[in-house]
Image (cartoon, helix red, strand yellow):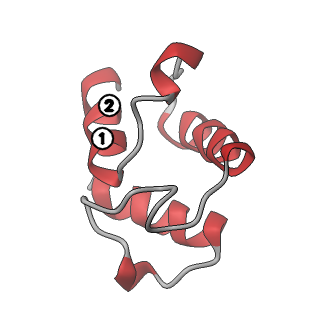
Amino acid sequence: MVLEKVIELLADQLSVDPSIINEDSNLVDDLDADSLTVIDLVMCLEDEFGIEVPDTEVENLKTVGAIVHYIEENQ
């Protein structure tokens, strides 16, 4: 499933326990990602799922659920 893979990637990239990540987790507020980390995450997600995320869409990917939805809609 996309959600499980996204959680795995986020946990690895952010060095956090995957059990604290859920669909409502906010990248900045809950997972302490800064803007540079978010860009790195987007690049990793693009590689993993074979998608391209335009710069204008990155600002809309604030939560894990938003990321999963974007991937499912654009894969």
Q: Where is residue 43 in the image (x, y as percent from the top left)?
A: 65, 37
Which residue is pictured at 35% across the width and 49% down the height? 63
Q: Position of residue 38 (x, y in %)?
A: 62, 45
Mark yes or no: residue 2 visible. no
Q: Is residue 18 positioned above or below 70 on the image? A: below
Can you identify the residue that label 2 sits on? Answer: 70
User: What quarter of the picture does the C terminus occupy?
Assistant: top left
Which residue is pictured at 26% across the width and 49% down the height? 65
Looking at the image, residue 72 sits to the left or right of residue 6; the answer is left
**In terms of depth relative to the viewer, which is nearer, 37 or 2?**
37
Which residue is pictured at 52% across the width and 22% down the height? 53
Looking at the image, residue 19 sits to the left or right of residue 43; the answer is left
Task: Count neighbours of disc 2 (C-alpha within 10 A) and say few if under 14, some if 14 to 19, many if 20 or more.
Answer: some
Can you identify the residue that label 1 sits on? Answer: 66
| Secondary element at tag 1 | helix
Which amino acid lies under the numbered mark 2 shown in the image of this protein? Tyr
Looking at the image, residue 43 sits to the left or right of residue 52; the answer is right
| Closer to viewer: mark 2 or mark 1 | 1
**Mark 2 in CB contact with mark 1 (< 8 angstroms):** yes
Q: In which quarter of the image is residue 62?
A: top left
Q: Alpha-carbon distance for marks 2 and 1?
A: 6 Å
